[in-house]
Image (cartoon, rainbow, N blue to C red):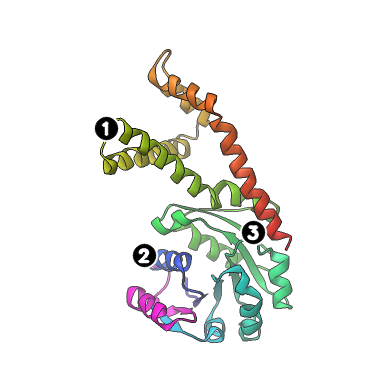
Amino acid sequence: MNKAIGFIGGGNMASAIIGGILHAGITDPSCIMVSGPTEEKLRKLEKKFHVRITTDNKEAAAISDILFLSTKPAVYPTMIKEVKDSLKTDAAIVSIAAGQSIRQVESLFGNEIQLARVMPNTPALVGSGMAAVSANKSLNAENLQDIMTIFRIMGKAEVVPESMMDAVTGVSGSSPAFVYLFIEAMADAAVAEGMPRDLAYEFSAQSVLGSAKMVLETKQNPGALKDTVCSPGGTTIEGVCELERKGMRDAVISAVRASTAKSREMDLH
């Protein structure tokens, strides 16, 4: 990919994306520029990745063929007003902020732009992310393909209609926190039964990782995979019945739908 890539904001997600790009050899560090208000934080990124840095957002925007808007949503109005006149005419903009619809971002720029709205999740930090990508009508096929390539090197990415973005927030954007709760709870139970804490976390986390890989690689229905573990009258079906008695399925559905509803509410503001 022979393109200059800019980041306005150098937080965890920007760092994950930069790391993925460089690990895959998509472009050279000299082709990446990160801007932000704190020079000390930028120096850390420069030392880690050997990328170019600047405290001038307009400078990062001006050099970018693909520009990531990786600031907090509340900063968008001020930040976009600052950089919108510095963009290349054919630049692709990537928005990764929650609650910022394509229509809202287009309105802030005030002129025609090539825009992708992306909902990544934090497992991208370890190369196992899931990203949803929605494109506006102006984004050309080449730029969309380059954006998909970037997010696929950090895990998986799919193009979805923007109408699905709120559901994406619930099922993949927020859900890592739900999974961490599950891992922690399983580990707590193992500790209560005498297992050391570090081993309890290792056993529970690896079990979740392996189970997820089974779903993705076998393409089997999760219910069918569950049935293969549940021997008649065995330990596993006893645990499954207890989870059903305690309302696990209903709790998970409610959590995902609550996160989806909150995302929808943010999109409306």
For the record, the magenta segment spans 25-49
Q: Secondary structure at mark 3?
A: strand
Q: Amino acid at mark 2?
A: His
- Residue 47 counted in the magenta span: yes
- Residue 113 location, x and y as percent? 68, 74
Q: Disc 3 residue type?
A: Ser
Residue at figure coordinates x 31%, y 42% from the top left: 202
Q: Is residue 257 magenta?
A: no
- 78 is higher (above) or lower (below) than 206: below
Q: What numbered label is drawn on residue 50?
A: none
Q: Nearer the viewer, residue 62 or 53?
A: 53
Q: Which residue is mark 2?
A: 23
Residue drawn at point x = 27 percent, y = 44 percent: 198
Secondary structure of residue under mark 1? loop
Who's the residue at 68% across and 70% down the image?
105
Comes first in the chain, label 1 or label 3: 3
Q: How many numbered markers are drawn?
A: 3
Residue of label 1: 194
Q: Name the quadrant containing residue 16.
A: bottom left
Circle 3 residues within 10 Å: few <14, some 14–19, many ≥20: many
Q: Which residue is mark 3?
A: 134
Question: Would residue 47 be visible to someone looking at this image?
Answer: yes
- Within 10 Å of disc 1 (Cα), the crowding (few <14, some 14-19, many 20+) is few
Residue 146 locus on image (x, y percent): 53, 65
Would you say the residues marked 2 and 1 are in contact, meaning their CB atoms lie under 8 Å apart? no
